[in-house]
Amino acid sequence: MPRSWTRLHEHLGVPPGPLTFDMVKKAADDNLAESDDLDWKEQLPQPPRNGRFNELAKDVAAMANTRGGLLIFGVTDQATEPVGIDPGEVNSQQLRAVDP
């Protein structure tokens, strides 16, 4: 996994490196606020319907047009409460197909 430096690394005071579940949990427990490079998402993205873009495409485009960032699924955006996701519901093909 490539080494990276994210808002979570900065908040937690850890050096660049892989992002771990424990780091996400600690940042959520600390109620780390969303920002232009961090977005908490409670649910996995839904496929586009009726030819309309979904929220994931908008989020990816917004971050791509700035300096990048993290979209973290399975955490409520207001209370930053970890709620998890069902890995069986992840549609990898849909995620790879997002074209901002």
Image (spheres, rainbow, N blue to C red):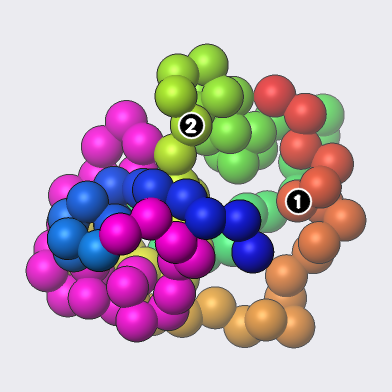
Left or right side of 40 for 52 = right
The x, y position of residue 1, in whole percent, is 64, 64
Secondary structure category for the residue under label 1: helix
Identified at 30% across, 59% down, the residue is 15
Question: What span is colored magenta in the figure?
Answer: 15-38
Dot 1, how many residues are within 10 Å of its Cα: few (below 14), some (14-19), or many (20+)? some
Q: Mark 1 points at which residue?
A: 95
- Residue 41 visible (yes or no): no
The x, y position of residue 42, in whole percent, is 42, 64
Q: Mark 2 points at which residue?
A: 68
Task: Decide which of tag 1 and tag 2 comes sooner along the chain.
Answer: 2
Q: As shown in the figure, which amino acid type bears the numbered disc 2? A: Gly
Q: Which of 15 and 100 is in front in this view?
A: 15
Quarter occupied by residue 99:
top right
Quarter occupied by residue 44:
bottom right
Secondary structure category for the residue under label 2: loop
The x, y position of residue 96, in whole percent, is 81, 47
| Mark drawn on residue 65 | none
Q: As shown in the figure, which amino acid type bears the numbered disc 1? A: Leu
Which quadrant is the C terminus positioned in?
Answer: top right
Mark in the foreground, 1 or 2: 2
Q: Does the magenta stretch include residue 63?
A: no
